[in-house]
């Protein structure tokens, strides 16, 4: 059977591209409005979570400082670290005295070089590193009624742990605000309108206000 001739035809192929329908202006405005509402709802929650994280870090700092004080006392006949030892300049301030118990060997001036413990600075402190040419400033204050000058004699020297009857009720550290070398009575209310207080027994609590300093009042120890 004879084969049929093949007819060759030339056709130009065309591709059809289909575009999905776009958003209308009303739909876009609706999406933007919903996203704005979600951001407004989530912002306070996120801020609260950040603030809580900073408060937990502050609690950890205070506990580390308490542990350093206990280690200092163990090596110094139970004496609380003095606010100033009267001998060693910047290293003689309580922050410098405790630095070696926090795994550091530098002074306050070495902070930016990593030689000063970050435990001295609260993450919620708006100005955690405040340089002072004479003495260090820190985010925390030490109770100067129990942490006194080492060169003083009783009753002006630092107290021994055994000289305080109720460690759970006596303040050791608290949040400070620009506290000059860390023992001025200048509380810093930066955690949800309150401040963190570490007691001699090591527990940390949040309080709305700092207890008043009254002679003989237990929160501040013997005066």
Image (cartoon, grey):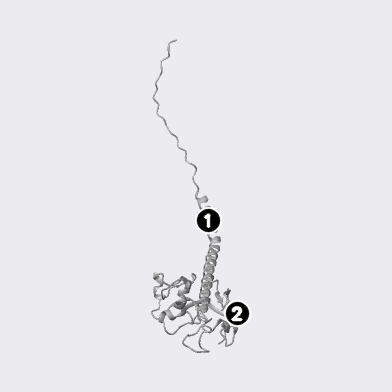
Which residue has dot 2 on it? 169
Q: Residue at x 55, y 60 (%)?
A: 42
Which residue has dot 1 on it? 35
Question: Circles 2 and 1: CB distance less than 8 Å?
Answer: no
Relative side of 54 to 5, left or right? right
Q: Quadrant of residue 107?
A: bottom left
Q: Earlier in the sequence, mark 2 or mark 1?
A: 1
The x and y percentages for residue 17 are 45, 37
The x and y percentages for residue 27 are 52, 50
User: How many numbered marks are there?
Assistant: 2
Q: Nearer the viewer, residue 81 or 142?
A: 81
Name of the residue lying farthest toward the top: 1
Q: CA distance from mark 2 to mark 1?
A: 49 Å
Quarter of the N terminus within the rendering: top left
Q: Label 2, secondary structure: give it.
A: helix
- Give the label, 2 or 1, closer to the camera: 2
Q: Quadrant of residue 4?
A: top left
Q: Nearer the viewer, residue 102 or 138?
A: 102
Q: Is residue 117 above or below residue 217?
A: above
Q: Residue at x 55, y 63 (%)?
A: 45
């Amino acid at each position: 059977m004879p084969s049929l001739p093949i007819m060759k035809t030339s056709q130009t192929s065309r591709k059809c591209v289909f575009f999905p329908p776009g958003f209308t202006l009303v739909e876009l405005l609706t999406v933007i409005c919903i996203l704005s509402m979600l951001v407004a709802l989530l912002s306070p929650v996120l801020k609260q979570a950040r603030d809580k994280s900073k408060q937990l870090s502050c609690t950890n700092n205070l506990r580390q400082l308490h542990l350093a004080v206990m280690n200092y006392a163990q090596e110094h006949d139970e004496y609380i670290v003095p606010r100033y030892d009267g001998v060693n300049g910047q290293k003689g301030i309580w922050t410098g005295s405790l630095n070696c118990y926090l795994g550091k060997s530098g002074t306050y001036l070495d902070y930016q070089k990593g030689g000063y413990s970050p435990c001295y600075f609260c993450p919620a402190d708006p100005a955690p590193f405040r340089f002072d040419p004479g003495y260090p400033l820190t985010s925390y204050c030490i109770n100067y009624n129990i942490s006194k000058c080492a060169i003083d004699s009783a009753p002006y020297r630092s107290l021994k742990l055994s000289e305080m009857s109720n460690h759970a009720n006596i303040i050791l550290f608290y949040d400070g605000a620009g506290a000059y070398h860390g023992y001025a009575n200048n509380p810093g209310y930066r955690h949800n309108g309150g401040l963190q207080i570490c007691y001699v027994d090591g527990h940390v609590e949040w309080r709305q206000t700092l207890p008043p300093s009254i002679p003989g009042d237990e929160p501040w120890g013997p005066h």
